[in-house]
Image (cartoon, grey):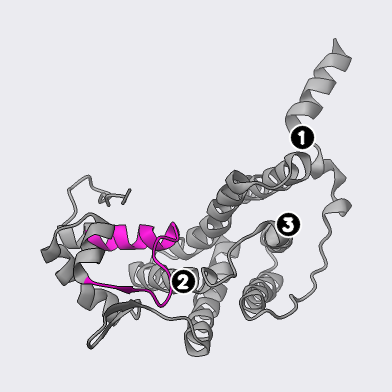
């Protein structure tokens, strides 16, 4: 079911804003596919919006490169090609490197600790219970959440908007076979933990290098190329692989 957008101040969004948010959610939920053709009425039904709102939405989607009008055929969702991949990941690299350097200097220790623990909790779940759809969903939320948090920490709405639009392009690219899956989950978490390690050390040079390598790794995954190696192994952190709840329970039992 499409998600209704709500403004931060509580005011009801315009129909055009709701239509855009519903379109975004359809991409995130993989209900809209790259290269797919849809009519205005099909898009209206898919977004659960009136035809007028959909007609107002179309020029914005065309301007953002998410959709194009094809004579005699209708509306086509952006098709994934080498040019789109190159442009989307190139923009992502520029924005995220700048955001990561700023985040390194401004994020609180408590926030970095919480982000790190959220990633280790996913690792422990994967190793303890195996990887299922719910874990993949939760991991995707944590993965993109870190990137969104760094971008928004810049406090620049123009950059945040540009990043959100580009993120939709990247999501479309990943729908072509590069989504976060069971075979790459732990690799992606390792890359994030390695990056968080540099953030916690406040090592700006390492932060820039590691976010750059992380984006290169994602690009290689899209292109079917080998992912670059990183100097971070889960087994080197045995204390983080232990469930803290179990550890606390054992400690309390021993104390008793």
Provide the residue span drawn in magenta. Answer: 19-39
Determine whether, in the image, residue 172 is placed left or right of residue 48: right
As measured in the structure, the alpha-carbon distance from the residue carrying label 3 to the one carrying label 1 is 17 Å
Q: Secondary structure at mark 1?
A: loop
As measured in the structure, the alpha-carbon distance from the residue carrying label 3 to the one carrying label 2 is 22 Å
Q: Residue furthest left?
A: 52
Determine whether, in the image, residue 217 is placed left or right of residue 83: right
Q: Which residue in the protein does label 1 denote?
A: 243
Res. 197 visible in picture: no
Tag 1: Cα neighbours inside 10 Å, few (<14), some, or many (≥20)? Answer: some
Mark in front: 3 vs 2 = 2
Q: Earlier in the sequence, mark 3 or mark 2?
A: 2
Q: Are marks 3 and 1 in contact (CB under 8 Å)?
A: no
Q: Nearer the viewer, residue 88 or 180?
A: 180
Residue 105 point in image, percent of width and height: 58, 63
Q: Is residue 225 above or below residue 17?
A: below
Mark in front: 1 vs 2 = 2
Residue 183 point in image, percent of width and height: 72, 60
**Quarter of the view holding residue 124:** top right
Res. 76 visible in picture: yes
Determine whether, in the image, residue 231 is placed left or right of residue 54: right
As measured in the structure, the alpha-carbon distance from the residue carrying label 1 to the one carrying label 2 is 36 Å
Q: Is residue 30 magenta?
A: yes
Q: Secondary structure at mark 3?
A: helix
Q: Is residue 169 above or below residue 129?
A: below
Q: Earlier in the sequence, mark 1 or mark 2?
A: 2
Residue 229 point in image, percent of width and height: 80, 73
Q: Which residue in the protein does label 3 denote?
A: 186
Q: Which residue in the protein does label 2 denote?
A: 172
Q: Nearer the viewer, residue 220 or 89?
A: 220
Q: Are marks 1 and 2 in contact (CB under 8 Å)?
A: no
Which quadrant of the rendered structure holds the C terminus?
Answer: top right
């Amino acid at each position: 079911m499409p998600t209704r957008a709500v403004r931060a101040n509580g005011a009801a969004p315009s129909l055009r804003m709701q239509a855009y948010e519903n379109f975004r959610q359809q991409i995130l939920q993989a209900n809209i596919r790259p290269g797919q053709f849809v009519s205005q009425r099909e898009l209206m039904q898919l977004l659960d919006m009136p035809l007028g709102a959909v007609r107002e939405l179309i020029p914005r989607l065309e301007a953002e490169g998410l959709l194009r009008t094809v004579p005699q055929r209708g509306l086509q969702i952006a098709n994934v090609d080498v040019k789109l991949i190159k442009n989307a990941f190139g923009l992502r690299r520029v924005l995220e490197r700048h955001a990561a350097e700023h985040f390194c200097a401004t994020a609180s220790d408590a926030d970095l600790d919480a982000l790190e623990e959220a990633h280790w909790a996913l690792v422990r779940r994967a190793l303890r219970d195996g990887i299922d759809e719910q874990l993949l969903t939760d991991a995707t939320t944590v993965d993109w959440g870190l990137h969104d948090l760094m971008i928004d920490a810049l406090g620049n709405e123009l950059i945040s908007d540009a990043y959100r639009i580009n993120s939709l392009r990247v999501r479309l690219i990943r729908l072509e076979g590069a989504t976060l899956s069971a075979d790459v989950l732990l690799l992606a978490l390792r890359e994030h933990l390695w990056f968080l390690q540099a953030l916690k050390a406040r090592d700006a040079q390492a932060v820039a290098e590691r976010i750059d390598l992380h984006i290169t790794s994602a690009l290689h995954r899209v292109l079917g190329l080998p992912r670059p190696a990183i100097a971070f192994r889960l087994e080197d952190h045995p204390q983080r692989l232990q469930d803290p709840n179990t550890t606390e329970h054992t400690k309390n039992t021993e104390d008793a």
